[in-house]
Image (spheres, rainbow, N blue to C red):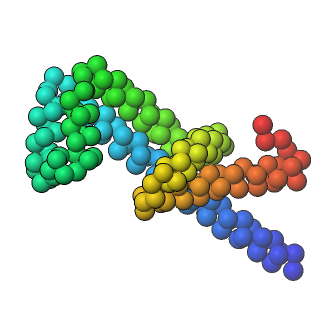
């Protein structure tokens, strides 16, 4: 009977490890995607260096059939394009590269199930919650709700992983430094 009980316990542990790995890899994939999108935006910023951003913005709005006189955000977009400089574009590209590197490192760590990456995901995700909450209060949109809920799910899952790992380590008499 002990053999059967041990097999059941081991099967349950294997299933939990599989669920954990799947969830971590889903979060890692999201972080990788975020890094790739921002990196592409950085390349887009570099592609605008030495170009007339106003003309390009105006052409884009024409292509999308958006009238800046009738859409506030289109006018904001044109104003931003008018105030952009090559130095600002390079700074945006550098910021995009730095952000992407951080997301790629986090994705790697989560994919490889590293404890430091779980802590990093927990802390970095928690840092965004106040800003996302503010944006949701300021303007309720499906996107704001989705971003906040996804981020909260990730933060709480990482917290759950860290707390259960620490509790398991305490039960087994190990320190999880």
**Residue 17 sits in quarter:** bottom right
Q: Is any part of residue 54 visible from this angle?
A: yes
In the rendered image, the residue lying farthest to the top is 87
In the rendered image, the residue lying farthest to the bottom is 1
| Image x and y of residue 100, in percent | 42, 36
Question: Relative to residue 92, is residue 38 depicted above or below?
Answer: below
| Image x and y of residue 19, in percent | 61, 64
Instruction: Tell which of 30 and 80 is nearer to you.
Output: 80
Q: Write the residue at 83% across / 41% down.
A: 175
Q: Write the residue at 31% across / 34% down.
A: 42
Q: Write the residue at 62% across / 59% down.
A: 20
**How many labels were placed on the picture?**
0
Locate residue 79 relative to residue 116 in the image: left or right: left
In the rendered image, the residue lying farthest to the front is 69
Q: Is any part of residue 147 visible from this angle?
A: no
Which quadrant would the N terminus be assigned to in this image? bottom right
Instruction: Tell which of 141 and 51 is nearer to you.
Output: 141
**Residue 115 sits in quarter:** top right
Question: Relative to residue 6, is residue 173 depicted above or below?
Answer: above
Q: Write the residue at 30% across / 23% down.
A: 88
| Image x and y of residue 78, in percent | 21, 37
Instruction: Tell which of 154 and 130 is nearer to you.
Output: 130
Locate residue 11 relative to residue 76 in the image: left or right: right
Which quadrant would the C terminus be assigned to in this image? top right
Question: Relative to residue 80, is residue 7 depicted above or below?
Answer: below
Instruction: Tell which of 129 and 174 is nearer to you.
Output: 129
């Amino acid at each position: 009977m002990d053999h059967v009980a041990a097999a059941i316990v081991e099967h349950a542990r294997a299933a939990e490890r599989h669920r954990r790995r799947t969830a971590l890899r889903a979060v890692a994939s999201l972080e990788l995607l975020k890094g790739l999108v921002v990196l592409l935006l950085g390349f887009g910023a570099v592609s605008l260096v030495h170009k007339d951003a106003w003309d390009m913005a105006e052409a884009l709005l024409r292509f999308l059939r958006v009238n800046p006189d009738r859409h506030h955000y289109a006018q904001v977009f044109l104003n931003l394009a008018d105030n952009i400089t090559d130095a600002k574009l390079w700074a945006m590209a550098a910021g995009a590269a730095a952000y992407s590197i951080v997301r790629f490192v986090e994705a790697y760590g989560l994919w490889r199930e590293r404890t430091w990456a779980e802590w990093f995901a927990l802390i970095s995700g928690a840092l965004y919650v106040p800003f996302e909450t503010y944006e949701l209060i300021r303007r309720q949109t499906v996107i704001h709700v989705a971003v906040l809920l996804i981020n909260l799910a990730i933060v709480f899952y990482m917290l759950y992983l860290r707390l259960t790992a620490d509790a398991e380590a305490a039960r087994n008499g190990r320190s999880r430094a």
